[in-house]
């Protein structure tokens, strides 16, 4: 009896546990069914009947670019675009023709839209035109009933308010090229643009921002039904440049009458690029949607290469501006001093060859300061022969020549500072003494960019501080300009700098200086500079024996380049600049007046603004 009772109690417990388990299981199933059929019924209904949820990336707003005073140089403006959907129109050709009668749509663009529509499904909208004006927008909107398949959409368009004035600095954006595709889905968005040149290219990653996302319902064919969720992207980071737009605009206007020229203006204490211009220039807005074939052919066939930034990519013989380097090298080597004299009869005989001075009858006896002021070639032939090319080259490199300077722009070229080893390595020939004489006046193999010449002038003006040029004042991701380490000194004595700067002062302000027309005529400030004229084509002995043609009598492309480097104010230098006018004839006649006007404008802007505090430059009254 007891055994039977125990058996029944055990069975009852097991049955109870089994029943509880079954009840819990059915309860869980019922709860899950309730959740699926009631709580999330709407969500899963979207997935029913062959519908599904799709996601689309949203292009972020590109970071803005400002000048040093907060004036916008590149920004994004709201734009309206007109789209066409092939499946919604009986004849795409007829619809585009009707649209072209309302707003300008080139025939070439019509063909491109038809070809693009053929590559996509019929329900995919194709952009016909962007940046519609208000009148064009209203015209299309009013006629929408008669334009089957045509719709309007809003977006952002990259805008360059100052157009060509900043083109070589800012660069431009354009449609993503196939070579740029790297698996990033953002790059596949039809409206997305990437930086193609200038600041836009160098800082493209920082300016891009992060994509947003849109979640929408589509049917089995992929046709969009409605938007369910939207999160806009994170805008790209803003950049603040060192450029002063007012000065940049003036430089551009001052150069506009030249066929081909470049100017760089620097702060001598920080290396900030205050203006950087190259003419001819181009309109960056033309590149945003891709250039037409005719426009591209016009730009690339122009002999003056408007797409090349000559300020950093043009390489020219520095001519007599290089005599400043030869003077410093000679002073530091002890090969000359302030009282060292050379007699200039107008030519130097070396073997059976004569090396001529630019002044046919010579300068007579000259000391260093006067030789710089009057740009006597014979004096610097003598110094170059005493120094040797290797010593000259070593000093040139200390002042930024013969190397890239790391400015934040693409296309910078290094120029060339030749020496014995360079010629042996590249030409397989020994260096000749005559080549040393030619190098001493900045000719021969010597090449420099306007940016390098401006840096050279800045380092002379600030007493040998190794400043480097920079264009971005505020680095991406920071709240302000990073603290700069004190610039390294070049190891040149102040005595040498003082003599060379004194010579530059006499160039502009002395009674016999080669650039007296560049004087600022202001007793409070003085401009110091150096002219340069570099030959494009070497004159043969036979040509020199006959009448040598003047520059104005030669074809433009055979005329000498005109150069000028300068700094001001002389007593406390703040700005340095370099001017190169291609085939301008002479540095004194073509380049120095441009430099004078630009420097006067920079100093005028200083007086009308609260100038930032800068460290005092070298001082000393002119002799």
Image (cartoon, helix red, strand yellow):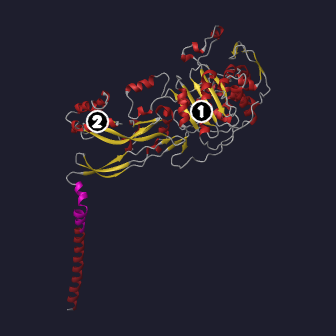
Estimate the x, y position of residue 530 in percent, counting from the top left.
Answer: 66, 26
List the residue tagged with mark 1: 601
Is 352 drawn above or below residue 433 in the view shown?
above
How far, Cα to Cα, is label 2 from label 1?
47 Å
- Image quadrant in which you'd find residue 492: top right
Q: Can the viewer see residue 414?
A: no
Q: Can the viewer see residue 566?
A: yes
Q: Quadrant of the N terminus?
A: bottom left
Camera-side residue: 464 or 348? Answer: 464
In the image, the segment drawn in magenta is: 31-47
Q: Bin the neighbour count of mark 1 within 10 Å (Cα to Cα): few under 14, some 14-19, many 20 and up.
A: some
The circle drawn on residue 275 is none
Side of 179 relative to 323 (left or right): left
Chief SS of the magenta region: helix
In the image, residue 103 lies in the stretch drawn in magenta: no
Estimate the x, y position of residue 394 in percent, counting from the top left.
Answer: 68, 31
Instruction: Looking at this view, name the residue that lies furthest to the top.
Output: 546
Camera-side residue: 291 or 614? Answer: 614
Side of 138 relative to 278 (left or right): left
Instruction: Looking at this view, name the residue that lies furthest to the bottom.
Output: 1
Estimate the x, y position of residue 252 in percent, counting from the top left.
Answer: 53, 30
Instruction: Looking at this view, name the residue that lies furthest to the right.
Output: 339
Side of 496 relative to 199 (left or right): right
The circle drawn on residue 139 is 2
In the image, residue 42 lies in the stretch drawn in magenta: yes
Q: Secondary structure at mark 1?
A: helix
Q: Quadrant of the C terminus?
A: top right
Estimate the x, y position of residue 510 in percent, counting from the top left.
Answer: 72, 25
């Amino acid at each position: 009896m007891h055994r039977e009772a125990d058996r029944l109690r055990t069975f009852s417990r097991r049955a109870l546990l089994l029943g509880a388990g079954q009840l819990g299981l059915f309860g869980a199933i019922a709860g899950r069914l309730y959740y699926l059929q009631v709580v999330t019924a709407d969500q899963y209904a979207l997935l029913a009947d062959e519908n599904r949820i799709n996601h689309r990336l949203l292009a972020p707003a590109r970071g803005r670019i400002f000048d040093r005073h907060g004036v916008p140089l590149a920004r994004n403006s709201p734009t309206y675009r007109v789209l066409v959907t092939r499946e919604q129109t009986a004849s795409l050709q007829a619809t585009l023709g009707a649209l072209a009668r309302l707003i300008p749509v080139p025939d070439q663009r019509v063909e491109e839209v038809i070809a693009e529509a053929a590559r996509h499904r019929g329900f995919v909208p194709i952009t016909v035109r962007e940046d519609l004006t208000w009148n064009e927008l209203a015209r299309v909107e009013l006629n929408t009933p008669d334009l089957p398949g045509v719709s309007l959409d809003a977006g952002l368009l990259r805008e360059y308010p100052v157009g060509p004035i900043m083109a070589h600095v800012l660069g431009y954006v354009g449609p993503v090229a196939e070579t740029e595709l790297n698996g990033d889905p953002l790059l596949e968005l039809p409206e997305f643009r990437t930086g193609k040149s200038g600041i836009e290219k160098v800082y493209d990653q920082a300016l891009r921002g992060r994509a947003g996302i849109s979640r929408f319902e589509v049917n089995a064919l992929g046709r969009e039904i409605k938007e369910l969720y939207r999160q806009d992207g994170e805008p790209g980071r803003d950049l603040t440049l060192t450029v002063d737009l007012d000065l940049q605009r003036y430089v551009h206007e001052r150069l506009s009458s030249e066929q081909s020229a470049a100017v760089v203006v620097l702060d001598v204490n920080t290396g900030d690029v205050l203006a950087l211009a190259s003419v001819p220039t181009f309109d960056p807005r033309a590149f945003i949607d891709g250039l037409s074939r005719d426009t591209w052919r016009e730009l690339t066939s122009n002999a003056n290469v408007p797409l090349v930034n000559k300020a950093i990519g043009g390489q020219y013989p520095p001519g007599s501006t290089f005599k400043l380097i030869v003077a410093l090298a000679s002073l530091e080597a002890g090969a000359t001093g302030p009282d060292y004299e050379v007699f200039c009869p107008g030519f130097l005989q070396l073997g059976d060859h004569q090396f001529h001075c630019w002044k046919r009858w010579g300068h007579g006896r000259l000391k260093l300061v006067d030789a710089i002021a009057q740009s006597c070639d014979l004096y610097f032939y003598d110094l170059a022969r005493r120094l040797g090319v290797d010593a000259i080259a070593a000093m040139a490199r200390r002042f930024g020549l013969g190397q890239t300077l790391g400015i934040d722009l693409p296309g910078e070229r290094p120029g060339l500072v030749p020496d014995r080893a360079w010629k042996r390595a590249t030409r397989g020939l020994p260096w000749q003494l005559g080549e040393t004489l030619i190098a001493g006046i900045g000719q021969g193999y010597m090449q420099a960019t306007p940016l390098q010449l401006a840096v050279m002038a800045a380092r002379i003006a600030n007493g040998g501080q190794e400043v480097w040029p920079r264009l971005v004042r505020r680095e991406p991701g920071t709240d302000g300009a990073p603290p700069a380490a004190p610039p390294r000194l070049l190891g040149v004595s102040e005595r040498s700098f003082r003599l060379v700067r004194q010579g530059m002062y006499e160039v502009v302000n002395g009674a016999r200086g080669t650039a007296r027309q560049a004087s600022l005529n202001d007793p409070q400030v003085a401009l110091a500079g150096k002219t340069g004229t570099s030959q494009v084509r070497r004159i043969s002995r036979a040509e020199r024996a006959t009448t040598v043609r003047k520059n104005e009598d030669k074809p433009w492309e055979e005329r000498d380049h005109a150069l000028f480097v300068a700094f001001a104010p002389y007593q406390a230098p703040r700005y340095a600049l370099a001017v190169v006018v291609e085939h301008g004839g002479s540095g004194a006649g073509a380049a120095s007046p441009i430099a004078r006007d630009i420097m006067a404008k920079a100093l005028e802007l200083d007086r009308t603004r609260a100038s930032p505090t800068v460290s005092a430059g070298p001082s000393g009254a002119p002799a």
